[in-house]
Image (tube, grey):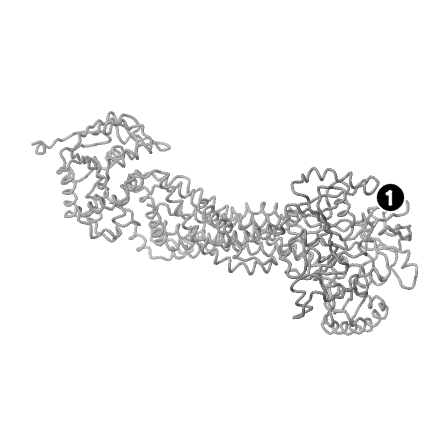
Amino acid sequence: MIKTMNLKRMYATDEVETTALNNVNIEINEGEFVAIMGPSGCGKSTLLNILGLLDNPSDGEYHFVGHEVSKYTERQRANLRKANIGFVFQSFNLIDELTVFENVELPLFYLGVASAEREKRVNEVLEHMGVMHRKSHFPQQLSGGQQQRVAVSRAIVAKPKLILADEPTGNLDSAHGSEVMKLLTQLNEAGTTIVMVTHSTHDSEFAHRIIHLFDGHVVTENIKEQFHV
Amino acid sequence: MGINYLTISIRNLKRQPLYTLLTISGLAIGVACCIVIILFVQDERSFDQFHAFKDRIYRVNTGMSGDGRPTNANGQIAAGPSLVKEFPEMESFVRFRKFGWNEKRVVAYEHRRFYEKRFMLADSTLFRMFSFPFIAGDREKALVAPNSIVITRSIAGKYFGDEEPMGKKLSIDQNNDGRFVDFTVTGIAENLPLNSSIQFDLVGSMTSETQSFRPWSLESIFTFVLLKPGVDVQALETKLPNFLEGQLGRKTTLSIHLQSLHDVRLNSNLNGHMEIPGDASIVFILSAVALFILLIACINFVNLSTARSTRRAREVGMRKVLGAQKTQLIRQFIGESILLAFSSVVVGLVLVEVMIPVFNRIAEKDLSLLSLASPEGIGLILGLIAVVGVLAGSYPAYVLSSFRPVSVLHSSSRGGVAGTAFMRKGLVVLQFTLSVAMMACTGIVSSQMNFVRSLNLGFQREQMLVLPLNDQIRGERQVFKQELQRNPKILGVTLTEQVPGRAGNGVGFQLEDHERSGAYRMFVDEDFLNTYGIELLAGRGFSTDLPTDGTESFIVNEALIRAQGIRSPREAIGKKFTMYHAGTQKQGFIIGVAKDFHIQSLHDRIEETMLTVMPAPKMNLVTIRVAPGDVSETVQFIRDEWARTSPHYPFDYYFVDEDFDQLHRADQKLGEVFAYFAILAIVAACLGLFGLASHAASQRTKEIGIRKVLGASVPGLVGLLTREFLLLIGIAVLLSWPIAYVGMDRWLQNFAYHVPISMVPFLLAGLAGLIISFATIAYQAAAAALANPVEALRCE
């Protein structure tokens, strides 16, 4: 599903050029649950942005679901992204001015799904995630755990093949964090590929495989045997 | 999803009430100014549009300058009939005869006697060519019979009350000579709409006396012709020079021109009008000013939305992550600004209701919002909403939609778009440049108006009471004068053809062996110079003791002898002088040279002028100079004397200074409207500044907290927060000066006599701009500086 070849990302300011990613080669197959770990500034989020088609690499190739997308324009990336990728962020990134229902509905709107169908699917997802009773509330009226459930609902409502989670439990207490990890595991078991950036060793335990980044390089890849039974 | 956009827009506006209030009120001010000006322009453009044949009606203008350009709206008695006779392209003509420029006629019915200003004579084709609505009578035939008259509804009520006016006779002192002519009422017209360039209350049939005018001399005659459908006007105009020479039987510098009725209101920069026309340049200036204010208001919206755009960065980022295209986001944000524009227009319309009475009073108009209640008006309002929405919303939409999700969703960076802060500063400078320039202009207009009021005109203008002459006074003028002068508070009495300020008529003259030339004329009596306090530089004034002064003496002004190349006033005394007037000539000598005095408005330079004593029938007005102090007693004395000498004439006076002020009424009006607009502009600009200052203060809460902890004083912090804004306003002040200077320099060129442009209005406007803007931002700055630093640091 995902294959990167010599992926590079450089950031240039007036005086300095920083290399955030350097010759990153990774491959992620459909159905995998992969955690990306590493210290702050190692390039985790940069990699996730590129994998999530939010950014283009400076050099190298990126193959996503069979397309070489490294030179795609913003419009092309947006089109590919909205049909295939769901995002879960540490800070939830719910739109404050929209209700729970409207937040979850948004991806379907941008996919051009008809209104009646949107309503049906959003209700299904909210039901499934246990936040149906909160559908008319605004994000600030919810607890952190509820907000993240809504964010996950939004990420999966369009049934994407890939979910990218950026520190999904970073803003949650341990009980709510575990809840979210369980949700992601369930999704993965149902066939969704999951790539998660995390600092938490506990969270990484849920993944099949851990990619360690350091200073923009992949340093190790641990395959967790117990998931290969 | 339109609903989704709408919902989120409304929620956004509700969540930020201060900014919503500032933006909407600013835009509402801009929109209200625009609507008032739209109504004004609509009214100006509606002039004469109610005539069915408006596209085929042309006014025959006259060119007197010899360069083939039209100079006068009035013309000759022969023009209409000869044109229609000569050119098959013309269907018919109407001539109007007006009586002088500011004269009133006594109209009487039984015991009712009033002066009427709007009395004219016209050809019988009047109501066939022009579609003035008729209430009674046969519009085709009403003016066919001699001495028939059509009156308006209000005149009918004024003279006849409940009686039936048709067939009744109105007596009119047509020539102001006491010989009343009876006119039979043959028609009643609806009161003429204000938006008509032709205005009358009574119109009589063209009299045989008028027919005895010299056919091609310039008179108070206004000719309109009706062309046949499809006539090529330009081709027709090329035939006019030959036609005119054929009529006159010689080469001529005179020319005639056709002007479409559509252009009569706004494109008539000509002498001799039936009514004072509109001024296209005022329409232009006011439109520009209204657009400036709207621009200032739109800038508020741009600045407040870009300044606060980071608040919406996450929304934009998330929408993009979820697949929104930039164009979809632009649409969303423009939609929001259109929603704001809509709200502003609603509030703006309420503001218009408040502004309209003030504007109507100043502009002497009768504008009403109701005139927008038409498909065209609604279209205009919708257009305004769209224009404001797009104008104000485009740049913020571009900025907001340019946020990159990568930077706004992950990192602590606020994802601002590069250059917006610079743009914002530039726009604040632009706003204040415009507002301060408008304030400076207001100051200069006002000082010019003071100048107009206080300038030494070369003649006495205060305490000068003017009355229209009638034949009884003319007949007993010496007794009347003597009786008045028994009162020590009456310092002088003089009979004249016109009063200074209004004397625009000319004569030909020849000075000894110099070339024949032209000059303005003043027909006066022997007491004119003394009564008006006009200074003599050489020679003597007219005297009743010398009978020759009435027949062969002339007084000229300095400008005349200068133009004739005579070096000193004394040298001119005793020179032979011939005056040519209305086909006659009067020969004599120069007996005096008067110091230059103004005989026209200050728009016109003092030009060659000659004074001569004329017999009483040539005189129209009597001027009485009253001693300063309580004039009411003296006026009562004059009233009694007037009633004794001419009991049948109403006592209807005015003062020369007020009349002179009237000449500059249009300038005054412009100045007053400008002042109001300048105030609105600065208010609109300050609303935006207030918003920006409040935003800046909130952005710097943490900085202020730290500075306070480290020992910064409150005044120091206020200085810190206001410095940057005041610098911008300072730049705006400097930029506004040359703009105001150039604009005002051009405006003052309209006046032959004007104030020098001094630094004072610029300095005052600049200072006012700085003080007002400081007051606007100081509150925010002080509130931020006084806040508890612990709170500020904790909230960060």
Tell me if I can see residue B727 in this picture: no
Q: In the image, residue B207 lies at what x, y percent?
A: 78, 57
Total numbered badges shown on the rendered structure? 1
* SS assignment at label 1: loop
Query: Where is residue B96, by image quadrant?
Result: bottom right
Tell me if I can see residue B472 in this picture: yes
Left or right placement of residue B616 versus residue B723 in this view = right
Left or right placement of residue B522 versus residue B200 in this view = right
Q: Which residue is mark 1?
A: B515
Which three-letter amino acid code belongs to the residue tagged 1? Glu
Q: In the image, residue B148 lies at what x, y percent?
A: 74, 60
Q: Give the residue drawn at x 39%, y 57%.
A: B783
Q: In the image, residue B424 lies at what x, y percent?
A: 44, 44
Q: What subunit carries mark 1?
A: B
For this rendering, which residue is in front, B528 or B201?
A: B201
For this rendering, which residue is in front, B703 or B659?
A: B659
Q: Is residue B329 above or below residue B790?
A: above
For this rendering, which residue is in front, A78 or B585?
A: B585
Query: Where is residue B313, by image quadrant?
Result: top left
Q: Is residue B683 above or below residue B635?
A: above
Query: Where is residue B471, by image quadrant?
Result: bottom right
Q: Quadrant of the N terminus of chain B?
A: top left
Q: Give the residue drawn at x 13%, y 34%.
A: A208
Q: In the image, residue B12 lies at what x, y percent?
A: 35, 51
For this rendering, which residue is in front, A119 or B312?
A: A119
Q: Give the residue drawn at x 84%, y 52%.
A: B582
